[in-house]
Image: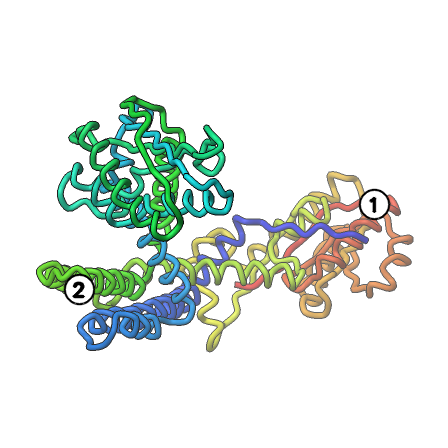
Amino acid sequence: MEMEFKINLKEVIWDLLSQWKAILVVSLAMMLLVTGAKYRKDTNAYEAAMHAREAVQMEGSADERISDIIASLPDDEVATVQFLVNQLEWIETEKEYMNNSILMNTNPANQRTLLLDYYVSLSDVNEATMTALVNGYKGYLRSDNLINAVGQFVSPGVERKYISELISITDNNNSITDSASDGAVLEISIVLPSEADAEAVEKAMTSTLTEYSSELRNRIGEHSISLISSSETYLFNNDAVNNHNNIISAVYNLQNNAKNMQLSLSDGQKAAIESIKAIKKESSEIATGSQQNIDESNQELKNNEISTPGFSKKYAVLGFVLGALVYAFIYLLIIIIRGRVNYASDAQCYTQSRLIGEVYEKTEKKGLWKLLHSNLVNSYRYRNKMDADIQKHKASDMLEAVCRREGISDAVLINLSGEKNKELFGELAKKEVANGIKLKSIEVDEDEIGKRLLSTSNVFFAVDSETKVSYLTKVAALCNDYNVNTLGSIFVGEI
């Protein structure tokens, strides 16, 4: 038989209020546990942060100091730190490129460009020789001499890599367009900075290539190179547009991702990341010979505050509330697992009959049981039901009133609470007999209840807090199947 277990939240809340002392003990214990765990975690993070800061000042290579910082972190924090350091380093690299690149700071949709076509003529035509000659000029376009030739027309201090990307070879048949059986055309484009003079750049390029041609004559073979076309124009650089957009999008996404990850970092992880960044910056400054920047980086790291471990009010409150919630959850679980009729309203609910009486008897609580009961709360909760004798009289009066109203003189009081309340229900039955109503109190085993109901027409249910819900619902269902008139129920509890 399927059984639907119901919980009266109002009564459960009253129970929990009555057990406030036990809840207080559990909540305080949980508060100490949570704040202790938080303090331990903060202490570990503080020690890791201090260790990371000290590692910056240690002797040794940058890689050794970074390895020492990583080794000081808990195992579960290492991967996050390494990932974030790499991400932040990549972001800074891309930002630096966007800020310093001449190509990225020109308008790619209207890019000022110098187009130069050089004709390479080979006196002794040979396919292998021509290929070697073409490759020689293509390689020279990335040489220091040619980059310096263009670099003299850009702002001072611009790095070589930013000048190199201004020069490109048109991708057309390996950058060489056949125009005659004894020669080829070398097509070169140069993105011109705003301050560069196109004619001067053209002369510098031609001069540099002409000088290099003498070296190729000795290495490869006799040939000549001459400028056949020169034009200054404004082009739409699709590659630069895509590169520009891709970098901006990637930096934006990575910055958001890194920002979100940093919100959940411990103090130790934050300090480790700052220390690793400082070490890498110091290593970079050493490479460029800037001691002033090194000192500034170290001072900035020293100024970063590291939170000292202490008592956390937020986690204390969290632990206290968590303790109360855990206690309430366990209590609800116990109620469900026990499967008993805990409250008078349960008796009415499961029997689908009227509750005609509630009797609560006072019991002395000792030891730990005192934590589970509050006299103050119970005196208010049962303020009109504290006197058991009065409640017994009310139950007796209701039994008589129901029988008179239904016009019956014969009924059975089925005691589902066992021997515990046998005497109480026996007294109620005797009072009704004295009032002219034949009421019999019986205790029946589960196996015999069906047979007994076959010979009964009118029943009252008598239950207490130890009555099984499964047994009560079984009896109520049998009464319904056998058309037994269920007149009401009486509940006996303890205070």
Q: Is residue 27 left or right of residue 439?
A: left
Q: Residue at x 69, y 58 (%)?
A: 463
Query: Of residues 241 and 489, which is closer to you in this image?
Result: 241
Q: From the top left corner, tell me how far across and down residue 408 is, in percent.
A: 80, 44
How far apart in space, not on screen, are marks 1 and 2 (Cα)? 93 Å
- How many dots with numbers? 2
- Which of the two residues, 198 or 212, is positioned nearer the viewer here? 212
In front of the other: label 1 or label 2? 2
Q: Which residue has dot 2 on it?
A: 286
Image height check: is 125 above or below 219?
above
- Measuring from the top left, give residue 425's x and y in whole percent: 70, 61
Labels 1 & 2 near each other (Cβ < 8 A): no
Q: Earlier in the sequence, mark 1 or mark 2?
A: 2
Q: Is residue 438 visible?
A: no
Task: Identify the residue at horizontal 21%, vertical 42% (top origin).
Answer: 149
Q: Which residue is mark 1?
A: 480
Question: Compared to 245, does 10 lie above or below?
Answer: below
User: Regarding mark 2 in the picture, which secondary structure is present there?
Assistant: helix
Q: Position of residue 56 (x, y in %)?
A: 21, 70
Q: Position of residue 360 (x, y in %)?
A: 56, 60
483 or 221, nearer to the observer: 221
Task: Please identify the residue farthest to the front as the structure is shown.
Answer: 124
